[in-house]
Amino acid sequence: MKKQYILVLVFAGLLATFNACQKSAEYKALIVTGQNNHNWKASSPVLKQLLEQTGLFTAEIVKTPEKGGDMSTFNPDFSKYNVVVIDYNGESWSDKTKTAFADYVNNGGGVVVYHGANNSFPEWKEFNLMCGLGGWGNRSEKDGPYVYFKNDSMVIDTTAGRGGSHAKRHEFEVKIRNAEHPVTKGLPIHWMHGNDELYSQLRGPAKNMEILATAYADTTGGGSGRDEPMLMTISYGKGRIFHTVLGHADEGGGPAMECAGFIVTFQRGAEWAASGKVTQKIPYDFPNAAGVSIRTGFKELTLADDMAMIEKYDITKSTKYFADLQSRIRNEAKTAQDYQQFEKLMIKVLESKEATDDSKKLILGELSWMGSDLCIPAIKELAKNAGLKDAAEFALARMQPTK
Amino acid sequence: MSDKTTRRDFLTRSAAAVAGAVILPQIIPSTAMGLGGKLPPSDRIVMGAIGTGSQGTGNLKGFLGRVKELQFVAVCDVDTSHAANAKGLIDQINKNSDCRTYGDYREFLEKEKLDAVSIALPDHWHGLIYSAAANKKLDVYGEKPLARTINDSKAIVSAVKNNNIVWQTGSWQRSLENFRRGAELAVNGRIGKLTRVEVGLPDGGRGIGTPPVMEVPAELNWEMWLGPAPKVPYRGVSHWNWRWILDYSGGQLTDWTGHHIDIAQWGFGMERSGPVEIAGEGVYPRDGIYNAPVEYDFNCKYANGIEMRVANASRLRMGMGATWYGEKGWIHVDRGNVLLASDPKILAEVIGENEIHLYKSDNHIGNFLECVKSRKETVAPVEIAHRSITVGLLGEIAMTTGQKIQWDPEKQEIIGNPVASRLLTRPYRQPWSVPTI
């Protein structure tokens, strides 16, 4: 009895600690799914996970009836939520539900339109005003112009033709077009996106719409030859809509959803749609022009993860863990103590029997500018090792210049 | 050995003939030299080239186009195919097969009797070879950026000054009308009191991961290519693409510092001084052997209150180039003969006799050759090149450390930050040693 009681107490204590560590979730999110030509069973749990891992959201998934079901039973109370994420491309909702959704947005509700959701409801005028642009579903010039970038300016193109296309999936570069918007502020201007469909030739009313980012649909891959909108914001009544065409889902998510660029812009876009501001920091693994950044399992790495992987580094493996350590030092170290915290972790790598010579070389380069006297004995020890002699001498020469 | 009388021999003998004279810069008015006409052999400048890859060959062709004024007799490159190509170009012009080739600059400098040398090398070699050429009392046309580190850069300046040689940096935009005119209008207050300056340089590009170790091509002396840089196995990255690796270069930022930052400082009278505070951030590749920043954005404060923002072009409204903002408007310059202003009337302004007239050169190589003869200062002298690259390298230090850097442009020291100060140098690998200042 007593034992069980203690266990319960310990458990309650752990739970309390856990809750205290969690940022209180400020916003409620509803993910609407249930029908889609895309793999909604894979994508919607990922979207929920991504929202909740920010610590800002509690998220629920609501499913419409299956195709052919009674759509009148689909009546969520949108007004309970700060943001509604649309992961849906299926049968039309009931007029009552459509009206309730339009009222919700009109009254200041936030919306995230995600990837294939912009294929849905070609007939629903209000929804298309919220999306700004859409594709497929027999969209054509009747639905509005093509909108894209040419020579760094936005083009509204009323040429007749189908709305919606994409070339074969590939990795492509996203270019930020408005770096002052809360969603995009501070992001690299150019970043490589994981293997995805590059949505092209979308058309729609494009009213009150701002394009935050584009990607060039290369003609050599069968693309449109235009800089196509990838991230957009739209205002509808008092409501804010964030529209991302990125993130085509495979089973378990796949590279388009595991791309840190997709994840972070989705999370920031959702916060902005819910609140009009973005408080999230830009993580160290955000991709840039040099290459993609895939967040396996949607998990952001901790410093401990980085250090563990750095130990195992050899020249055939990725340097990303070391690059992230460098970013942490740049961004987080302010005082001498901060630097020493990092230095102590790095000395452990220098002294580790398991750590590779290649990892030690990287660490020696970094310590050469930010190390203190603390690391010198470990470096002198490595200078005895033929394979590390040069790198150790480089570090020592920089730290203890002979004048 | 050369049987030709070099111009330097000629000058030395002439000077020696003047009793008690030190070797003063001998001023021969260019008009008297009959520029454009064929010069007597004793007045033709005897030249060699170190580094004959893409940029070095481009420069060489520029020089060879003025063959009436000069003669190339030798080239040096760690890649025998580069040296052979350059020899081919030279022999064709000289109508003989006498151009000598070297793989080691020390031997080249020891054996050749030259007046001047054209040097185009990866940045990590600049400190040693620019200093060595200056110490041989050769006039130098050297590629920007001046050096890989601020300490190397200082050493080059002192070698050039101590040896009283003529130096021209390959910052050729200084010899174009639109850049000079824009800078001259800005520095003379034609847009009112200057408040800030923006400089847009190229964005970085895609990485290549870490290619496998490869056999070093037979024509390349890899050990000599690396020189003072860390010893690494050959992975197919040497010529041209060295500039994306921090052991050899600072990436697009430092590559272009000698162009648009150089022009920008010209336009607000800071080309022989520098900022007092530098802060900003870079975006770095996360994977592979290319590790120079692909984006960068830093701010430099000057003692006169002007702030200069340096960023990859796609972060700036005006994109590539230099833009001066004053209380009454702006002026923007870029390649492609771009000279724009907030009001076109600004561009029609005449600079009065008593105002600042910037150094006028209409041909960068021609200016160098004229100065070799006249012993006057060139349009892109070593001190200015040094002050230009210092800005880029201080930006690099601010981004590397994530710290706000305080800089004393007089003493040329980082103030109160021994850790960041370490980044003023890069230790050399044995047997090479950092050139002394």
Image (tube, coloured by chain):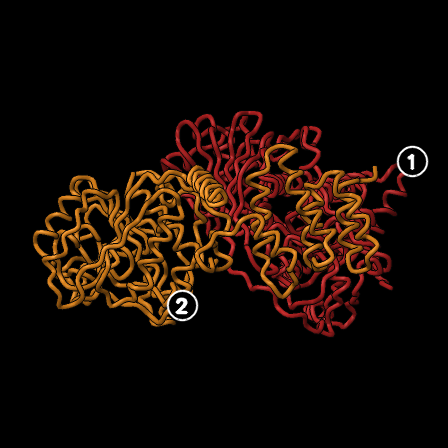
Cα separation, mark 1 vs mark 2, equals: 76 Å
Residue B20 is labelled as 1
For badge 2, the amino acid type reads His
The quadrant of the rendering that contains the C terminus of chain B is top right
Chain B is shown in which shade?
red
The answer for which chain carries disc 2 is: A
Q: Residue beneath label 2, please?
A: A170
Q: Is residue A243 above or below residue A251?
A: above
Q: Is residue A187 above or below residue B301?
A: below
Q: Position of residue A40 (x, y in %)?
A: 28, 63
Query: Going by the image, does A224 lie left or right of B423?
Result: left
Chain A is shown in which shade?
orange
Q: Position of residue A167 (x, y in %)?
A: 33, 70
Quarter holding residue B90: bottom right
- Secondary structure under tag 1 reads loop
Residue that appears at 71% across and 34% down = B418
The answer for which chain carries disc 1 is: B
Q: Position of residue B293 (x, y in %)?
A: 56, 50
Query: Going by the image, does A377 lie left or right of B424?
Result: right
Both labels 1 and 2 in a single chain? no
Residue B122 is labelled as none
Towards the viewer: A230 or A262 = A262
Towards the viewer: B432 or A130 = A130
For badge 1, the amino acid type reads Gly
